[in-house]
Image (spheres, rainbow, N blue to C red):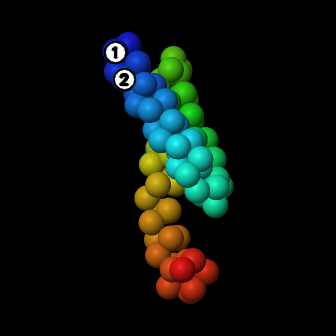
Amino acid sequence: MNALRLLITAGAAFYVVVFLVQVARDASVAGQALAGVVLLAVVAGLTWMHDELALNRYEVALLWVMVLGFPAYAAAIALGVLA
């Protein structure tokens, strides 16, 4: 599991750099980049938890946030909130 933790952390660090490059190229995406960095930090941090019960709860909650994010996004598009 230690190698998997390191790979997930390295992948998160890589994508943080990608977000920062995107912000440097176009400052209007700074909000989205910040949200991406926060989510990556949370997900990478979850892999370093040692309490299995808490980890399971956080993983399930994160899964539901991601699943419910899709219909929320679709509803925002359908209602014209997002273009």
Seen from the viewer's position, the closer of residues 63 and 11 is 11
Q: Position of residue 41 (x, y in %)?
A: 56, 34
Q: Can residue 30 be seen in this snapshot?
A: yes
Q: Is residue 68 above or below residue 12?
A: below
Q: Which residue is pictured at 47% across the width and 75% down the height?
A: 74
25 and 2: which one is in front?
25
Q: Residues within 10 Å of mark 1 (few under 14, many from 20)?
A: few
Name the element at disc 1: helix
Q: Is residue 56 visible?
A: no
Residue type (three-letter) at the residue carrying disc 1: Ala
Measuring 52% from the left and 70% from the top, which residue is drawn there?
72
x then y, percent, for residue 82: 57, 77
- Residue under the image location 47 percent in, 55 percent down: 66
Q: Position of residue 16 (x, y in %)?
A: 52, 37
> Image quadrant for the N terminus?
top left
Q: Residue at x 58, y 56 (%)?
A: 26
Q: Mark 1 highlights which residue?
A: 3
The answer to whether residue 69 is above or below residue 59 is below
The quarter in which the C terminus is drawn is bottom right
Which disc number belongs to residue 74? Answer: none
The disc label shown at residue 7, or none: 2
Of 27 and 15, which appears nearest the observer? 27
